[in-house]
């Protein structure tokens, strides 16, 4: 029987007995600023993937990894016959930027009536966002930034598109950097210089970016490059900002606070694609 706080990380991570050492995305491409995934991303990471609350009694359990993938057996056993919601998405980068949600009604779902939620495009475990107010945030102190670059695996159910940072009322948020607890204008956010979808540069029409062509039939790997006004940033928020919440599936978001060259970008994209079968 597993007790609360159970971890099952590290199986097949070391190289004894003829088994090759596990090499994750962040082993090949280190120095990520924040990394959230339902797969193991780094050999040295010994923490969990997510913390889950079951709706039957509101008990919570940390869920780790087995064979470098989410420990779905422990997850479904814990949530047998009930729903499971993610309260924390742990940061695998080593920087402690865990994403949390303490309000039960805003916690994304990962188990439905005892059944693991899967992204129907790749049949892998997925966090499901309701498109109303589900989301996470972290208030861990961040450095003065000039660059923000990220890779996201998303399957949206929204027809309004996906929005990274903008002051329009269209689209749905994926994530936003905030320089304070309350953000009221673009001066408190970051400006996008280029954004890529499946390695194709998208044309921007605003001081921000959103995808009108994102639909609910495809899982996308998106690459975002951001040029940021130099200042201290206090919060990184995922999926919901002022009611413009993303609906659909999310499986991985990894970001760097530095420039990513094209060779590295292609390598990261190919690694993510090999796991999730996006393109």
Image (spheres, rainbow, N blue to C red):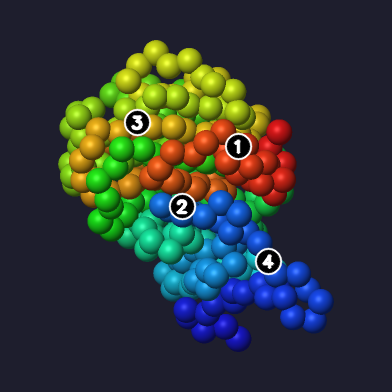
Residue at the right extreme, as displayed: 18
Q: As rendered, which of 250 and 165 lies closer to the eye?
A: 165
Q: Which mark is residue 168?
A: none
Q: x, y (%) of residue 107?
A: 41, 54
Q: CA distance from mark 3 to mark 1?
A: 19 Å
Secondary structure found at label 2? loop
* CA–CA distance in space, label 2 to label 4: 18 Å
- Can the viewer see residue 155? no
Q: Any mark on residue 227, and which?
A: 3
Which residue position is annotated with label 4?
22
Q: Residue at x 43, y 16 (%)?
A: 204
Picture quadrant of residue 229:
top left
Q: Kindly state the secondary structure of the residue where label 4 is placed.
A: loop
Among the two numbered marks 2 and 4 on one chain, the one whose residue lies closer to the N terminus: 4
Is disc 1 surrounded by few (<14), some (14 to 19) or many (20+) residues within 10 Å?
few
| Residue at 60% from the left image edge and 44% from the top image edge | 268
Residue 142 locus on image (x, y percent)? 28, 52
Residue where numbered disc 2 is placed: 32
**Is residue 124 toward the left or the right of residue 91 in the image?**
right
Q: Are marks 3 and 1 in contact (CB under 8 Å)?
A: no
Towards the viewer: 252 or 218: 252
Decide: marks 2, 3 in contact (CB < 8 A)? no
Residue that badge 1 annotates: 263
The quadrant of the picture occupied by the N terminus is bottom right
Mark 3 or mark 1, whichever is nearer to me: 1
Pointer 2 or 3: first along the chain: 2
Q: CA distance from mark 2 to mark 1?
A: 16 Å
- Sequence-first tag of 3 and 4: 4
Q: Is residue 43 visible?
A: yes
Disc 1 from disc 4: Cα separation: 22 Å
Q: How many neighbours does mark 2 have within 10 angstroms: few (below 14), some (14-19), or many (20 or more)?
A: some
Task: Work out whether mark 3 precedes mark 1 in sequence or the reverse, and give the earlier one.
Answer: 3
């Amino acid at each position: 029987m597993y007790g609360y706080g159970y971890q099952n990380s590290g199986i097949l991570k070391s190289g004894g007995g003829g088994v090759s050492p596990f090499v994750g995305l962040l082993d090949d491409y280190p120095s990520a600023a924040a990394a959230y995934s339902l797969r193991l991303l780094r050999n040295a990471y010994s923490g969990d993937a997510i913390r889950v609350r079951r709706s039957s009694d509101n008990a919570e359990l940390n869920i780790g990894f087995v064979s470098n993938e989410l420990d779905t057996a422990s997850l479904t056993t814990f949530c047998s016959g009930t729903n499971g919601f993610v309260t924390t998405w742990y940061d695998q980068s080593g920087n402690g930027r865990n994403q949390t949600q303490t309000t039960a009604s805003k916690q994304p779902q990962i188990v439905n009536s005892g059944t693991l939620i899967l992204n129907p495009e790749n049949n892998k475990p997925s966090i499901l966002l309701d498109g109303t107010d589900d989301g996470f945030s972290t208030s861990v102190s961040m450095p003065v930034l000039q660059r923000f670059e990220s890779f996201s695996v998303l399957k949206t159910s929204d027809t309004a598109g996906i929005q990274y940072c903008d002051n329009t009322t269209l689209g749905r948020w994926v994530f936003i950097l905030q320089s304070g607890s309350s953000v009221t204008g673009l001066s408190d956010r970051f400006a996008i210089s280029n954004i890529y979808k499946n390695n194709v540069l998208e044309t921007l029409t605003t001081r921000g970016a959103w995808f009108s062509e994102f639909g609910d039939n495809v899982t996308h790997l998106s690459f975002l490059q951001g040029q940021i006004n130099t200042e201290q940033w206090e919060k990184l928020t995922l999926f919901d900002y002022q009611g413009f919440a993303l609906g659909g599936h999310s499986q991985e978001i990894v970001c760097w606070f530095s420039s990513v060259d094209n060779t590295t970008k292609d390598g990261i994209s190919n690694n993510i694609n090999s796991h999730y079968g996006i393109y």
